[in-house]
Amino acid sequence: MQSPSLTVQNLNIRELGINPNHWYVVARSTEVQTQPLGVTLWHQPIVLYRDNSGGVHALEDRCPHRQVKLSHGCVIGDRLECHYHGWQFQSSGECAAVPYLAANQKLPNCKIRTYPVHEQDGFIWLFPGDVETLHSAQIQPMGVPEWEHLNYIATVSVIECKAHYSYLIENLMDMYHGHLHQDWQAWTDAVLEDIEEKDNRVDVHYQAQSYYKIDKIWSISQLFFPALRRLHPEPLDVSYVYPHWVSTLGKDFKIYCLFCPVSETQTRAYLIHFTSLNAFWRLHKLPVRFRRFVKDSLFGSAQKLLDGLVRQDVLMIEEEQQAYLNNSERKSYELNRALVSVQRLIRSQVERG
Ligand code: FES
Ligand SMILES: [Fe+2]
């Protein structure tokens, strides 16, 4: 019999699963209200809901009575009620009420799987792996510290692509694809300088020319008018912090990509772009209320830029996936050694999971 690690080594990277012993991002905080929300994380249908006191819960999206989706139901207090016959479930997964239970009948002894879930930095982080490992290894969500920081302006774009997650992370780690982005291009002339590989991450350092510099308050307008951009050298660092991605371009830009792999041919992710206001020290002396107002008013200021980049990337990634499905034997040529490190990390994580 083949050992599991041999199987992982032999399988094509585009067929590999995930290491479930990490925190994945399954929704934005604003998406989860008292109306239940159905999401899928690596083939597992999950229902998310917010109880009356604001707490978020995650359960398997399957009513144990007739196997329909609980996400069609509604929330009553802190219980989830199935749409079909109205059975109610506690957030711990136990059945709490059946509306037509006769006096001589007991509540069914069924329990739905629950998932550790955590709301942090504007997103819902979910741990699909082994709960004992979570506690013994004290695994923490990666987090997005700039989300609440008053010096950073955020823009969020949702990536929905019909492709394996490896295509998306390879796109994000390969800074030689600036060519694709033309008018939206944030950087050019990237040169890979250094790669560091650790158990949980790959850090790749490039030197590049950046198009943007945020040193005057009106510099933000570069995000709307590409013609205002001027090239200048900046370090460009990209990191695969399994299973997520983070990048910094000079001092002014930071981008995250938070992953929710759905299946071998579908990936959902959240791209978060931060423009830094660190250069404006006068702004930092103003009252916090005003700074919060500036941050909130400028939220989404890079939307057009970010959505444009995502559209261009998704088109390429989906074509790669289709080409693989049509002819998985065809060999590609890769010159960027960062992608070798990325694939090595994916394999070693899947092996461990
Ligand atoms: S199917 Fe859910 S209560 Fe009957
Ligand atoms: Fe891109």
Image (tube, rainbow, N blue to C red):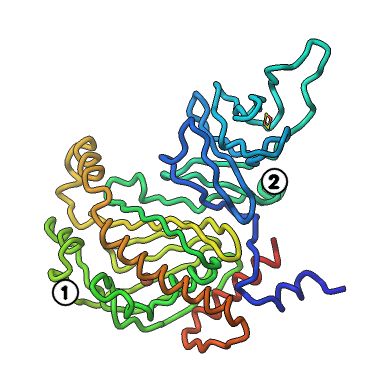
Q: CA distance from mark 2 to mark 1?
A: 50 Å
Residue drawn at x 65%, y 56% is 20
Q: Secondary structure at mark 1?
A: loop
Q: Secondary structure at mark 2?
A: helix
Residue drawn at x 52%, y 74% is 322
Mark toward the start of the polypeptide (2 vs 1): 2
- Residues packed near mark 1 inside 10 Å, few (<14), some (14 to 19) or many (20 plus): few
**Closer to the camera, 305 or 229?**
305
Residue drawn at x 44%, y 41% is 31
How far across and down, in percent of the image, does residue 299 sit?
Answer: 27, 48
What amino acid type is highlighted by mark number 1? Arg
The quarter of the rendering in which ligand 2 is drawn is bottom left
Query: Can you say whether 134 is above or below 200 in the image?
Result: above
Residue drawn at x 48%, y 78% is 195
What amino acid type is highlighted by mark number 2? Val
Report which quarter residue 10 is drawn in: bottom right
How far across and down, in percent of the image, does residue 237 sit?
Answer: 39, 71
Q: Is residue 81 left or right of residue 314?
A: right
Q: Is residue 214 left or right of residue 208?
A: left
Q: Which residue is mark 2?
A: 131
Q: Which residue is mark 1?
A: 230
